[in-house]
Amino acid sequence: MYLGDKERNRVALYKCKKCKAEKELSKTTIKIIDGSVRVVEALCSCGEYMEDTTEFKGYPNLIRTEPSLKD
């Protein structure tokens, strides 16, 4: 499947609340760390986890085409 440049290069901007450092990440790994959901790659050099600053635009719509799921 071909992904256009816009879809392929989606980057999320993460910012540290403690030291104000910023990091752009295009691929992330989500894990539960100390009881919270964290992005592993968003660990700041100061030791805190950065927060995603991109706007949440909702979940995609799924269209079911299987006959058993239509009604």
Image (spheres, helix red, strand yellow):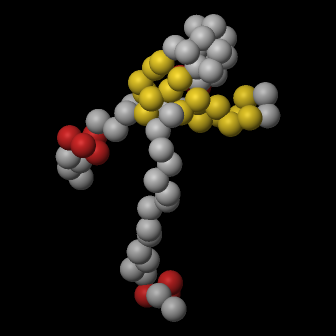
Residue 33: quarter of image = top right
Marker count (numbered)? 0
Residue 52 point in image, percent of width and height: 53, 33
Against 69, is 11 above or below? above
Residue 67 point in image, percent of width and height: 43, 87
State whether residue 27 appears in this view.
no
- Residue 2 in the figure: left or right of residue 69: left
Camera-nearest residue between 29 and 21: 21
Name the residue furthest top: 46
- Residue 70 in the figure: left or right of residue 46: left
Q: Residue at x 41, y 74 (%)?
A: 63
Name the residue furthest right: 35
Q: Residue at x 41, y 24 (%)?
A: 24
- Residue 34 in the figure: left or right of residue 43: right
Residue 44 point in image, percent of width and height: 58, 14
Against 48, is 7 above or below? below
Residue 46 point in image, percent of width and height: 63, 7
Q: Residue at x 51, y 34 (%)?
A: 53
State whether residue 4 appears in this view.
yes
Against 36, is 44 above or below? above
